[in-house]
Image (spheres, coloured by chain):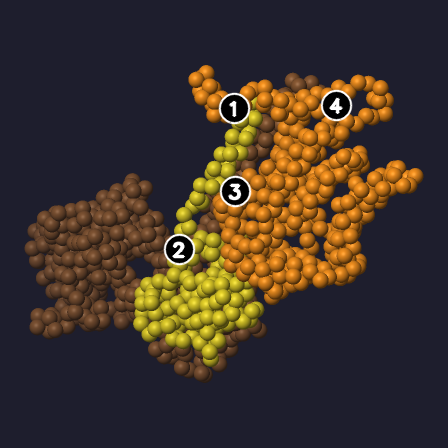
Amino acid sequence: MSTLARWLGERVPLGRFDIKELTNEPVPEHLKRWWWCLGGTPAYLFIVQIATGILLAFYYEPSAARAYESVRFVTEEAAYGWFLRGIHKWGATLMIAAVILHQMRVYFTGGYRRPRELNWMVGMCLLVCTLTIGFTGYSLVYEQLSYWGATVGANIAASVPVVGPWMKTLLLGGEEYGAQTLPRFFMLHAAVLPALMICLLVVHIALIRLHGVTDLRFRGDESKPPKPFLFYPDHFYTELMIGLGLTVLLAALATILPATMGPKADPLSTPEVIKPEWFFYVAFRWLKLFSGTAAVLSIGFVLFVMFVWPFIDAAIRKYTRFAEASVWIGIAGALSIIGLTVWEAAVAH
Amino acid sequence: MGGALVAAYGSAAAVAGRYLFPARPAGKRWIYVAQVASLQRGHALPWRTPSGERVSIARVGDGQSTDDFIALSSTCPHLGCQVRYESQHARFFCPCHNGVFSPEGKAVSGPPAEAGQDLVRYALRVDGPLLYIGLSERQIASAGQEA
Amino acid sequence: MSLDFKRIVIATLSLMFLGSLLFVQWMEVSRRRAETGEAGAHIAIPDSSRQCVDCHMQNTMGLVEHWKDSTHAESGVGCVECHQAEKGDADGFEHYGAHIAVIVTPNDCARCHPAEAQEFMASHHAKGGNILASLDNFLAEVVEGSRAPFDPHAPTPGLAPGQGLVGGKVNGMASAISGCQQCHGGKVAFVSTDGGHVDVDDLKPGADGKPTSQEALARIQRDPTGKPLLHPATWPNSGIGRLNLDGSRGSCSACHSRHDFSPRRARQPENCGKCHLGPDHPQKEVYEESKHGVAYRDLIHDMNLDSDEWVLGKDYSAAPTCATCHMSANTRNGMKITHDPGTRISWTNRPPVSLVLDTDVHGEVVKATDPAERAKLIEDTAQAKRNRMRQVCSHCHNDSYVNAFYAQYDEFVVNYNEKFARPGQALMKLLLDKQLLTPAQFDEEIEWSWYYLWHHEGRRARHGASMMAPDYAHWHGMFEVAERFYMAVIPQARELAEHAIANGKEAQGKAVMEFIDELLARPEHRWFEQQKKH
């Protein structure tokens, strides 16, 4: 045993203490509150998505002729395929929900403020990646709804001034949805976006480690000395508990509400009701309210504002009296997002 | 704790392993289509598999052997539209994007030809006076049974 | 939250995860089982029959379920494939977009099974309907019933005034309809506009089965949807020699019961037992008593009855059933099934006197006695037929055994023929020729006695010998033949003769007496009265 340890130690010059040092960063006490564990949740779900996604890719064939059939094969014939697909589908939903919750927590606790502005922007990139990966993944099934969802999505992209048509062509691999489209979506979904997200995550986490987690003091605690605790095992266990809880929840969702097969995509017949996945309801409702370029541009503008918010917030705090403005703006924003989503969900058209 | 963790994630890994292990071999069954005598040369019989896929079955020779018949999927490999046989042009035509296929199912022009996608060909078998088509279990399962 | 508590929570959650995976596994297993176990999962409902299946699953689910268990369903042969009618068919009608007919005839089956249909058409089975024109039918139509409908003695339960198939009268054909015709096959008919029959004789179908008589076609009564009404006296009927509206004869479903057409069932003796049983030809009971039947009952699980092909010597060899010997394939005949069971039978034990089955081109027994003439007429000899049967026997028995069995069988038949059948037949003919009997059948006691002798007891004896059932050969057979001969036919003939002599037909009476005395003086009968005379 010691021989093996020595052999390994020579080749991997990493002592036990180095490992402890690397993993056991002390974390502030407030992380013992559950609300502060939301960052680990999307990371855990991301791992689940990678694992199930790789498995699904073993059988998936990204072509118009075979896509639907291969998804059907996974769902109906491959052993446990229905379960893995269910986990992947519900994992996506939960991951997007977790990302949004994490972002809201960071926002409302001011975690993006100096010196962490850059990490907020990295996080915004991760949000956009997550939404895009959700969109491309949904389109891969080649169901009637996902086909038309992708078609509508491409047309929205096309309505962006100047670069719109170019974006659409790039996205679809041609003037319209064709033989090139699915391979493109598949590459984005299974290779480009995950790789990009991993890079962004590394940066995201590295920045957290470099800055340390914001040490928050709640009312009444200000006078107490900081009581940091170890990442491992204490915080790790907390994250593990959340992860396991999520896994059980995923398994339950995948069995109780399994991923099903809608009708196969038919380019010749547009369905009565086209709806994207729930996380695009906001944008979809918005597009219906302000048709065309205006809506697209306004969504782009909102995204841009979110992206640079740390600097806007700093400016507000510096040059106005409204130090708490971000909270009220955040509440207004969250309420309008929820309102638009519920609105879209409640009506047929 | 460790044991429980290993058991849980271990069985998850086992599920993944079982999933990757090939499913049942794709068995092919011979399904009755029509009587050989009922097919005229040059005419295509529109037929649907029990699962609802459209197949076009034509007689290409006067003999009684399997080679005298051809069965092609009516689903365009481009985007899944339904092709139709145009006897005046002796070709299959897809109205969605003007895909054209030869009577043997080879893509001649339009998007399918660019992508090199021919119509899917089904196996046929002549057994005495009867013509059979080779279908997978999935193509045999009726649409209603899947629900 | 302490670390230990966290550990416990993690362990609990892990176990929950494990539990959910076990549940998933259970779901997967039960899903697989449902997939492989469900009969429905293996069948191919052709697109053309999907609508039929959906609707009839509600209305006549048993019928559809039967079909779902059939080989037809496995190979994608649905409702329309068999029930389709062509334009111009007398019995075709529109049914939810499909042009179909109710009755599927051998012509329909022949579309896919031409060889089988041809063999069957050539068989004696297909000619079962000939009985309708024969004397046998006289029993059911006249003796048991009445060809003309008759009035009930008084208002009668079960028959409301003015109702029933013959306008409130008693249907004297009832016995023939429910009896004879359900085995032999009836003549399928439509209800005509005047309430009568329109059958194959009226329709005069051509070679293609389509009617040539427009007049008959016009007389067919139809319901408001245009569906022709089949006459309830003629349908349902699955008799094996049914006379169909398209001119074809027979019914494949007589043996291959609809709608599962189970080969398994056709291989079992009970299937033949629908008709081949009872006092006049108890083949099924004879078989059950034989070593063959006993072995079958015991070894039924080794019979491989479900196998696709069912070749004796390859798929099974535990015991023979009716089908094994008379129809099924075996390894020594090129694995060829025949749908003409007559091709392996060397004696016909049906008539009063058994005949050797040398048959002509039409499959009829050659009755000519001149050897040259016989040689000219015979197409398939009894010996050839017997050799085909020997191929079956040889799977279990060696040649000398089989030859010795046939020697026993032949001599049994000859003994019956020579001792009782031929003399009895000659005596009955003499009585008729001498006008001691009326031409009407069954109006004199001796006619009943003679009928019992050959049609019931004589056949029982011969069938008993042919299929190794000693009790039928002897007690239910020859013993009763002898009793009938000595204790009924002979005394009744003498009584008729004495009666004739006493009533002015002396010559005729004496001729009969002489015939009987000569007969009884023969060595084989001498025992009977030898001691009484002294």
Mark 2–mark 4 CB contact (< 8 Å): no
Subunit under mark 1: A
Q: Are marks 3 and 2 on the same chain?
A: no
Residue A256 placement (x, y as % from top left): 62, 41
* Residue B23 in sight in this render: yes
| Amino acid on which the number 1 mark rests in the picture | Pro
Question: Circle 4 is placed at which residue position?
Answer: A29
Direction from residue C118 to residue A14 in the image, left or right: right
| Amino acid on which the number 2 mark rests in the picture | Arg
**Circle 3: element type:** helix
**Circle 1: element type:** loop
| Distance CA(mark 3)–CA(mark 4) | 39 Å
Question: Circle 3 is placed at which residue position?
Answer: A55
What hue represents chain B?
yellow
Q: Are marks 1 and 3 on the same chain?
A: yes
- Which of label 3 and label 2 is nearer to you? 3
What hue represents chain C?
brown
Which of the pair C67/C224 is nearer the observer?
C67
Q: Is residue B60 above or below residue A223?
A: below
From the image, which quarter does the N terminus of chain A lie in?
top left
Please give the name of the residue rendered at 47% of the width and 38% of the height, measured from the top-left corner: B18
Direction from residue B63 to residue A186 in the image, left or right: right
What hue represents chain A?
orange
| Distance CA(mark 2)–CA(mark 4) | 66 Å
Nearest to N terminus: mark 1 or mark 3: 1
Question: Circle 1 is placed at which residue position?
Answer: A13
- Which of label 4 and label 1 is nearer to you? 1
- Which of label 1 and label 3 is nearer to you? 1
Q: Are marks 1 and 2 on the same chain?
A: no
| Amino acid on which the number 3 mark rests in the picture | Leu
Crowd tier of the residue under label 1, counting other residues whose Cα lies within 10 Å: few below 14, some 14–19, many 20 or above: few
Residue B34 placement (x, y as % from top left): 40, 67
